[in-house]
Image: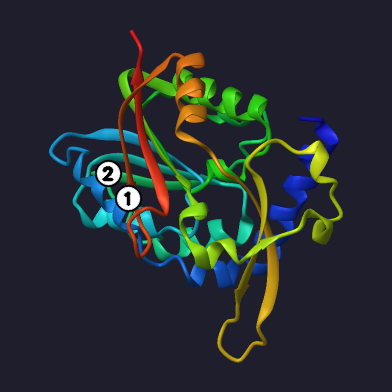
């Protein structure tokens, strides 16, 4: 994908999270059923270090602490408003047993892993964040970067939106002309969706978000090319339990 096109798609989401950060955070106070299922698969009886890419407003960090886990949980996000919310709601939760911290970072910046150069993780999470990254070359780069951040036997667990399974969400698909972008320069799966919400005492506003619709085969290819193998996958979330696809990747060797 052309770099200028990627920049235009990223600007759509940067504008959205800058303008709608507090309102969006208000809709993400609870974790999804699929995330709960993933947490059940992560042992609580031994210390471990986890990195959460696209941590959002801190809901998972709160659950992580509430489950009595030990080790460390590091949340990374590019949205200033969401990071501030995360820091606020978890300010009193970091202890000697569990270190909770939040750091700014943009997955589109090829240098984002530099801050972790002296650290390896037992697992990396990325719930509902990778589908906001444009361009296959960026997807592959991030998968490889995550692979390098993991200890031997580490796990990469993530989810991607499958909005095509929701008639309601499909009604929110917008033409690319609404963002002034020629659809011919985009990759298959690139989609523009609207988002509507209002905080109390505020008028309803409409925002636009860029989302890439991943297929299972596309994710399997990315995994194979970055040194991973798919250990597990399942669908969850939404009224029909199929609004998101979850994958767990592990070392191929």
Q: Position of residue 84 (x, y in %)?
A: 55, 61
Answer left or right for 46 relative to 150. left
Mark 1 and mark 2 in contact? Answer it, CB < 8 Å. Answer: yes
x, y percent for residue 70:
23, 41
Q: Residue furthest front?
A: 167
Residue carrying label 2:
38
Observer able to see residue 223: yes
Q: Is residue 142 above or below residue 42?
A: above
- As rendered, which of 96 and 189 lies closer to the eye? 189
Q: Indicate the secondary structure of the residue bearing disc 1.
A: helix
**What's the mark number on residue 76?**
none
Q: Residue at x 43, y 24 (%)?
A: 119
Where does the image place residue 38, in percent across and percent down from the top left? Answer: 27, 44
Query: Residue pushed farthest top?
Result: 253
Q: Which coloring applies here?
A: rainbow
Front-most of residues 222 and 146: 222
Residue 71 horizontal/vertical position (percent): 27, 37
| Relative side of 56 to 237, left or right | right
Placement of the C terminus among the 4 image quadrants: top left
Tell me the residue at 35%/65% (across/down).
239
Above or below: residue 154 compared with residue 86: above
Determine the secondary structure under disc 2: helix
Circle 2 packing at 10 Å, graded few (<14), some (14-19), many (20+), is some
Is residue 111 something one can see in this rendering?
no
Q: Quadrant of the N terminus?
A: top right
Residue found 62% across the figure and 74% down from its top: 196
Please give the name of the residue rendered at 39% of the width and 60% of the height, measured from the top-left corner.
59
Residue under pointer 1: 35
């Amino acid at each position: 994908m052309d770099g200028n096109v990627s920049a235009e798609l990223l600007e759509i989401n940067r504008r959205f999270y800058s303008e709608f950060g507090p309102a969006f955070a208000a809709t993400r106070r609870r974790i999804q059923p699929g995330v709960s299922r993933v947490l059940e698969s992560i042992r609580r009886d031994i210390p471990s270090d986890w990195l959460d890419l696209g941590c959002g407003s801190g809901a998972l960090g709160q659950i992580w602490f509430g489950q009595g886990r030990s080790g460390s949980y590091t949340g990374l996000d590019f949205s200033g408003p969401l990071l501030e919310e995360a820091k606020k709601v978890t300010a009193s939760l970091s202890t000697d047993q569990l270190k909770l911290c939040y750091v700014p970072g943009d997955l589109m910046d090829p240098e984002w892993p530099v801050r972790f150069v002296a650290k390896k993780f037992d697992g990396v999470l990325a719930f509902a964040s990778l589908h906001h990254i444009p361009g296959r070359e960026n997807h592959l780069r991030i998968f490889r970067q995550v692979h390098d951040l993991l200890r031997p036997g580490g796990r990469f667990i993530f989810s991607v939106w499958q909005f095509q399974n929701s008639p309601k969400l499909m009604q929110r698909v917008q033409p690319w002309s609404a963002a002034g972008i020629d659809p011919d320069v985009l990759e298959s799966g690139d989609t523009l969706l609207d988002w509507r919400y209002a905080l109390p005492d505020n008028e309803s506003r409409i925002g636009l978000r860029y989302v890439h619709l991943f297929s299972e085969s596309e994710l399997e290819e990315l995994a194979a090319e970055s040194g991973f193998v798919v250990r597990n996958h399942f669908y969850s979330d939404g009224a029909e339990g199929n609004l998101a696809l979850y994958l767990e990747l592990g070392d191929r060797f």
